Amino acid sequence: MSFDIERMMKVANNKIETIKFKLNNCSFTGVEEVLVGDALHYPLLGMDEKFYSANFFQKMIRCIKWSLIILGVSFIDKYDYEHIDGSNTLFLFSSSYGEREDMKACFYKVVDTIDRYSMAVYNGQKRVVYTGIRDLYLFLKWKKELRAHSIAGSLYERMYILLNMVKPYHDYNCICNHFESEGIDFDNIVTWCDVHCVDSMFVQKFKNREKKTITLQHGFYSEINNNWTIKGIKSDYFFAENEFTADILKRNNYTGEIIVCGSVHNIGVHNKKITSDDKFKKIGVILSGELLHDFNEEIIKKISLIEGIDKYDLYCKFHPTSILSTYSIEGDTKYKAVFGKDISGSKFLQDIDLAILCPSTMIYESLYQDVPFIVVEDPYEMYRDYCLPEEFLVKIEELDIFKIESIYGDIYKEKFMKIKDYYVTCGNIDKYYKNAFNTIGVG
């Protein structure tokens, strides 16, 4: 699988920005208080060259398919629910991340830091509900409103937008109907990441009802690439992983309250101390997500061909969203083992002595677990987002056994410990989250 990186990294073209602006300035029936354009930010990015290059018959087939999905979605609830008496807070793990079991595991760890909670967790399993029947008329009104306000020029565009309006609204209704039927109301909501569709819908709805809204940090927040993760935040509270992210939000005028709690991935994970002799045998290669697919492939091949690498045990960890069969590594005997989403990045780090990284949040994890690392500079300069000292960076053409073996010299050690305090929150992460929730009246 390959991607047009420049197109994927572009936040939105002028046409998408125009559609988003119109959506935000249209008061749709039933969601008058919601900035729909903001809620649909990521689906709108799907209206790219490939979207518009479809021929007439492909567009018609897609419109029919989307209509059937809208009809089917209206009768299905795909969430699991849990409520502990006395809970005043809804913890939401929405369909925006439903296939990411690694994220769900971390979500559960966050919830477990408090005693009383309510949860709505997407599980993907269908359960028939009939409350969505009354919403079908509403969806028809939205279709008319999209046309009346000239938000999109074609039926093809309007059906795509309508589909992506229906999904978060239906999730919102299903979850609220479930708890309301049991006489349960909430003072607060905690979302995994409030810039995605369903989470944004909930946060905007709850804020309109003057409820407290809290969002977690689940990954890297960039000022350069994909800065919507910063600009799109609407929650009253942001639980940051580190001071580095807190400073990014402050520079970008986030108006809510920032509480530094540490990485959700590090709840229950203890630091691994470096041995005194600094010797290493196991080298782990940790790759980025699919946006850097081709670069990942280049790294895999480059490292396996390094002269002298044979004297070390070489392991590779793919991003949870990667499909291993799309890479050539399966036939590379230099790697003793290859891992996908079957183990977490944290677990992988615990079993290696040194890490070679593509730009990713595993930089944070390596610092937390005291694993020496070096980051290979990608051609799209995503590595610059992390603002690392030059001792932690290497160009792919300069990566050799001497560079690898020189990692963790005296200068490296000193800077490692210096940046660790800024990029990583150590200590009792469980307690930090519990205290933060207690401070704002959660649990």
Image: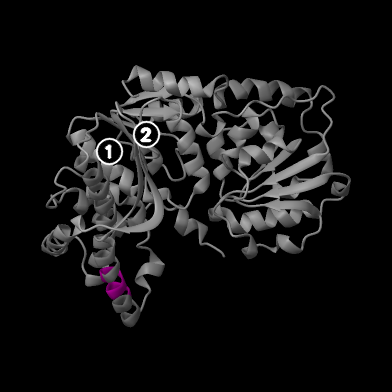
| Count of numbered marks | 2
Expressed as whole percent of the image width and height from the top left, the position of residue 400 reads 80, 45
Q: Which mark is residue 433?
A: none
Expressed as whole percent of the image width and height from the top left, the position of residue 1 reads 57, 65
Q: Residue at x 14, y 64 (%)?
A: 140
Task: Please say whether residue 211 is one of the residues in the magenta stretch.
Answer: no
Question: Seen from this angle, which residue lies furthest bottom?
Answer: 57
Q: Dividing the picture into quarters, in which one does residue 143 lie?
A: bottom left
Q: Main secondary structure of the magenta part?
A: helix
Image check: 166 left or right of 439?
A: left
Distance in Å between CA atoms under marks 2 and 1: 9 Å
Q: Residue at x 17, y 34 (%)?
A: 209
Amino acid found under the numbered disc labelled 2: Thr
Residue 299 visible: yes
Expressed as whole percent of the image width and height from the top left, the position of residue 197 reads 32, 49
| 159 in relation to 402, above or below | below
Residue 221 visible: no
Amino acid found under the numbered disc labelled 1: Val
Expressed as whole percent of the image width and height from the top left, the position of residue 281 reads 83, 38
Q: Quadrant of the C terminus?
A: top left
Q: Which residue is mark 2?
A: 215
Q: Are marks 2 and 1 in contact (CB under 8 Å)?
A: yes
| Span shown in magenta | 62-67
What crowding class fits label 2: few (fewer than 14 Cα within 10 Å), some (14-19), or many (20 or more)?
many
Q: Residue at x 31, y 81 (%)?
A: 56
Q: Considering only order in the chain, which callout, 1 or 2, is on the residue closer to the N terminus?
A: 1
Q: Which residue is mark 1?
A: 203
SS at badge 2: strand
Q: Residue at x 70, y 63 (%)?
A: 328
